[in-house]
């Protein structure tokens, strides 16, 4: 019989909180009006959307009219990067068609940049050091007169390293380039203030902060012009399509809860410290990412002499849900592009494990993992390499 599950993959997705579901339910039942309709059902839906917009804005330190609702974090990334790139290209009559990013971006960004390169844009990729940090000097060296946008993620989705966003955005502002950051992993886990960060564009996703899948948001600073991916009059002509009212309400409630509970990150840090202390007792293990400048809710490890994908399966048989990397590349035994960019030895990178906690995580969850992990590692290492 399978043991009761322990979920420690909150960087992949999070459970919808009861308060979020409760807030959404009326808009899945009687409150079904189209928020663009003028009669009372539509206007009640509009009020709910605008209340959620205020809740998202509060989490980010933004003005309400700077929030655009999207379908997910990936759409927010694409809307920001492609929208800014196309707008700058058209306004400059093709003079500005250069984008700077980093070697460790999410696949949503990497895939889009590949598409833009095929459409005659040029893309430069800033390297990272062994801790996963991007150097502002390296980014500055890549900016030229044709650069319209720089996009560097706030916190990495694998190793959790937090980038020096304030310094990066300041140099972009001085050089006349817009700055976008993918904050999908950091939103709700650490304080975010778009004014302090100095960013022009910032992406978040609902299912990373205990809202449902299929909803996201983009912060677009006042005055920023973006070519829309989906045309239509909704979201002030910035993103067409009838608004997903129930999910927008859920995202708003999740942001409200996250803002109230940001001060509780010390509890996650205690769990993380216990986790790391236990895991690093295993011979041949190491911690990846910056030792201090990273997200408080998890850790990324590598184990010498085994396959991380097989380790995930072994722990799943014990009822423990973790990952060997980002969910979008789940099942792959190849070293991730993030660890490769950090210079981690390929054999060591293949034996990786990402453990991430969230709102529902407990000390008992960490204890279960630390009980199951050492024998699982030992068992896999005893299997001859050719038989794995």
Image (spheres, rainbow, N blue to C red):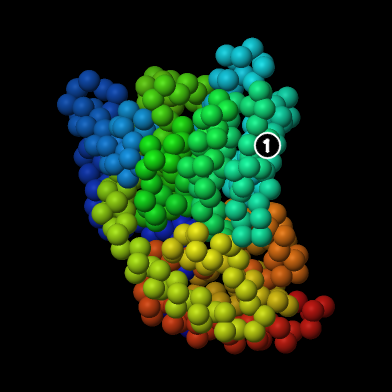
Residue drawn at the location 71% of the way across and 64% of the way down: 344
**Residue 281 point in image, percent of width and height:** 57, 84
Q: Position of residue 357 (x, y in %)?
A: 43, 66
Disc 1 marks which residue?
Answer: 141
Reply above or below: 251 against 295: above
> 256 left or right of 384?
left
Q: Is residue 41 above or below residue 284?
A: above
* Outermost residue to the left: 40
Res 33 quadrant in image:
top left
Q: Left of 23 or right of it: where is 82? A: right
Residue 310 in view of the camera: no
Q: From this viewpoint, which residue is outermost toward the right?
A: 386
Instruction: Answer yes or no: is residue 368 visible.
Output: yes
Residue 120, picture quadrant: top right
Residue located at (69% from left, 41% from top): 125
**At 39% from the left edge and 25% from the top edge, which residue is drawn?**
222
Closest to the observer: 147 or 306?
A: 147
Q: Quadrant of the C terminus?
A: bottom right
Location of residue 171 in the rendering, given as x and y in whole percent from the top left corner:
55, 35
Q: Position of residue 54 (x, y in %)?
A: 27, 37
Mark 1: few, some, or many residues within 10 Å (few <14, many ≥20)?
Answer: few
Q: Nearer the viewer, residue 341 or 90?
A: 341
Numbered marks: total: 1
Closer to the camera in the image, 285 or 169: 169
């Amino acid at each position: 019989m399978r043991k009761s599950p322990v979920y420690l993959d909150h960087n992949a997705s999070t459970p919808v909180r009861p308060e979020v579901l409760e807030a959404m339910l009326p808009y899945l039942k009687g409150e079904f009006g189209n928020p663009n309709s003028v009669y009372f059902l539509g206007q009640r839906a509009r009020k709910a959307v605008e209340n959620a917009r205020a809740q998202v804005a509060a989490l980010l330190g933004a003005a309400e009219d700077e929030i655009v609702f999207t379908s997910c974090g990936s759409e927010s990334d694409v809307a920001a990067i492609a929208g800014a790139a196309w707008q700058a290209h058209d306004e400059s009559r093709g003079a500005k068609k250069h984008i700077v990013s980093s070697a460790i971006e999410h696949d949503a960004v990497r895939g889009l940049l590949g598409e833009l390169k095929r459409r005659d844009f040029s893309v430069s990729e800033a390297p990272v050091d062994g801790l996963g940090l991007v150097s502002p000097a390296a980014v500055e060296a890549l900016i030229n007169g044709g650069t319209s946008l720089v996009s560097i993620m706030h916190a990495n989705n694998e190793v959790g390293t937090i980038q020096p966003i304030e310094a990066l955005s300041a140099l972009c502002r001085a050089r006349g380039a817009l700055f976008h950051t993918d904050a999908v992993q950091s939103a709700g886990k650490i304080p975010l203030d778009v004014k302090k960060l100095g960013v022009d564009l910032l992406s978040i996703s609902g299912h990373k902060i205990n809202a449902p899948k299929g909803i996201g948001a983009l912060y677009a600073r006042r005055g920023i012009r973006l070519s829309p991916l989906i045309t239509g009059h909704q979201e002030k002509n910035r993103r067409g399509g009838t608004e997903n009212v129930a999910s927008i309400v859920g995202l708003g409630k999740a942001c409200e809860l996250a803002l109230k509970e940001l001060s509780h990150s010390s509890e996650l840090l205690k769990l993380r410290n216990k986790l790391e202390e236990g895991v690093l007792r295993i011979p041949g293990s190491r911690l990846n990412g910056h030792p201090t400048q990273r997200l408080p809710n998890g850790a990324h490890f590598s184990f010498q002499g085994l396959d991380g994908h097989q380790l995930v399966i072994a722990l799943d048989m014990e009822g423990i849900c973790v990952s060997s990397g980002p969910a979008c590349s789940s099942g792959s035994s190849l070293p991730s592009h993030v660890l490769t960019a950090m210079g981690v030895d390929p054999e060591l990178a293949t034996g990786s494990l990402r453990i991430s906690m969230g709102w529902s995580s407990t000390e008992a969850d960490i204890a279960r993992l630390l009980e199951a992990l050492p024998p699982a590692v030992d068992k896999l290492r005893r299997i001859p390499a050719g038989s794995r």
